């Protein structure tokens, strides 16, 4: 099968490409390296089943040709990361809304199945757990720019579902919760690579707020497995589905765990949000997915224990530091 992966040079995208190529699929990546890295796919470049195109998904002529010639699209290209979105609000909104609109329009024109990446951010500031796909969504005001990411991704979800309902386009929308593993960068704010780098350098580990906010973390290999299964799952068409981990952990406990596993002598310091993200910032205090729908659709849900994922990720960063 020919599969087009937008954002294939990114963290999740490049891990997905490794799997698809080793499964014998022919993979084309389109990525403008705005947040991805060529280094992530360098090892695939000479492979006869792998093609890389450096371009933006906003190039409509290019995207039309690529989508016409593929069997299926996995749309991961997006502006990601709280830090990146806050520093680049306009570009983020444009990429995340217009980019997805281009993909859906041509997928519809050429009748191609398309998986659209969404995010757990769309749930907003819930305190209950677990979050189910049909829960209400709770956002703050538009002056708090963080919510623009959730709102843009929500527009993507609405657009994809509207194409499905009115044109019978085969769309699957997946909401990724915090995903971690090799190749993730801390440059856009993501907590685990930042903590690991700080720990390996014995620098202070910077916990924002009081550290009681919680998340679940998913090993990228488990996300890839879920995506491969979703791609072939007819029952998932027209559905929104969570992909995430199970073990809820506070950010302070996460810092302690990373410090312990990496045998670091770093101090753990609490940093006020305002020092990092300015005045109008709201964090999400809790974010735990319901995985019932994912399991019932594909008979699988992420299962790699957090300690094991952290060990693998720490090894990856250690080998790069060497
Ligand atoms: N965080 C932190 N220190 C950092 C980076 C992030 O304490 O250096 C916190 C952040 O405030 C949030 C959690 O870690 O509560 C997860 O942040 P991330 O940006 O990775 O993902 P998201 O907020 O989208 O879940």
Image (cartoon, rainbow, N blue to C red):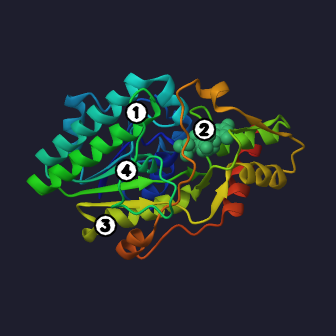
Secondary element type, mark 3: loop
Q: Which residue, given by chain and number where applicable, does mark 2 sit on?
A: 185
Per the image, the residue denoted by label 4 is 137
Q: CA distance from mark 4 to mark 1?
A: 13 Å
First reached walking from the N terminus: tag 2 or tag 1: 1
- Residue ID for mark 1: 141
Give the residue pinned by disc 3: 232
Q: Is residue 98 left or right of residue 117?
A: left
Residue 63 at x, y percent in the picture: 24, 35
Which residue does the image show at 23% across and 60% down from the upper left? 238
Q: Is residue 190 above or below residue 301?
A: above
Q: Position of residue 118 (x, y in %)?
A: 38, 48
User: From where the camera sits, is residue 184 visible?
Assistant: no
Which of disc 2 and disc 3 is earlier in sequence? 2
Q: Nearer the viewer, mark 1 or mark 3?
A: 1
**Distance Cα–Cα, label 1 vs label 3:** 39 Å
- Asked if labels 3 and 1 touch by Cβ distance under 8 angstroms, the answer is no
């Amino acid at each position: 099968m020919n599969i087009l992966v937008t954002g294939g040079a990114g963290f999740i995208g490049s891990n997905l490409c490794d799997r698809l190529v080793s499964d014998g699929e022919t993979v084309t990546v389109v990525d403008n390296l705005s947040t991805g890295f060529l280094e992530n796919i360098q090892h695939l470049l000479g492979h006869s089943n792998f093609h890389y195109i450096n371009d933006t998904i906003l190039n409509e002529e290019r995207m039309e040709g690529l989508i016409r010639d593929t069997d299926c699209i996995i749309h991961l290209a997006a502006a990601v990361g709280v830090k990146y979105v806050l520093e680049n609000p306009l570009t983020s909104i444009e990429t995340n809304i217009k980019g997805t609109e281009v993909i859906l329009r041509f997928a519809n024109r050429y009748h191609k199945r398309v998986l659209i990446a969404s995010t757990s951010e769309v749930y907003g500031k819930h305190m209950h757990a677990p979050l189910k796909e049909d829960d209400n969504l709770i956002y703050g005001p538009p002056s708090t720019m963080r919510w623009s990411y959730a709102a843009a991704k929500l527009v993507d979800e609405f657009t994809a579902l509207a194409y499905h309902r009115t044109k019978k386009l085969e769309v699957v929308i997946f909401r990724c919760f915090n995903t971690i593993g090799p190749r993730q960068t801390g440059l856009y704010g993501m907590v685990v690579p930042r903590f690991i780098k700080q720990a390996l350098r014995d620098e202070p580990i910077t916990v924002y707020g009081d550290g009681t906010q919680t998340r679940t973390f998913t090993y990228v290999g488990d996300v890839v497995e879920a995506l491969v299964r979703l791609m072939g799952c007819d029952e998932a068409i027209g559905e929104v589905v969570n992909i995430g981990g199970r073990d809820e952990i506070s950010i302070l406990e996460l810092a302690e765990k990373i410090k312990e596993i990496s045998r670091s002598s770093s101090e753990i310091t609490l940093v006020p949000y305002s020092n990092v993200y300015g005045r109008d910032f709201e964090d999400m205090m809790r974010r735990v997915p319901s995985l019932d729908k994912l399991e019932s659709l594909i008979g699988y849900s992420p299962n790699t224990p957090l300690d094991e994922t952290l060990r693998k990720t720490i090894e990856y960063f250690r080998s790069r530091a060497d």
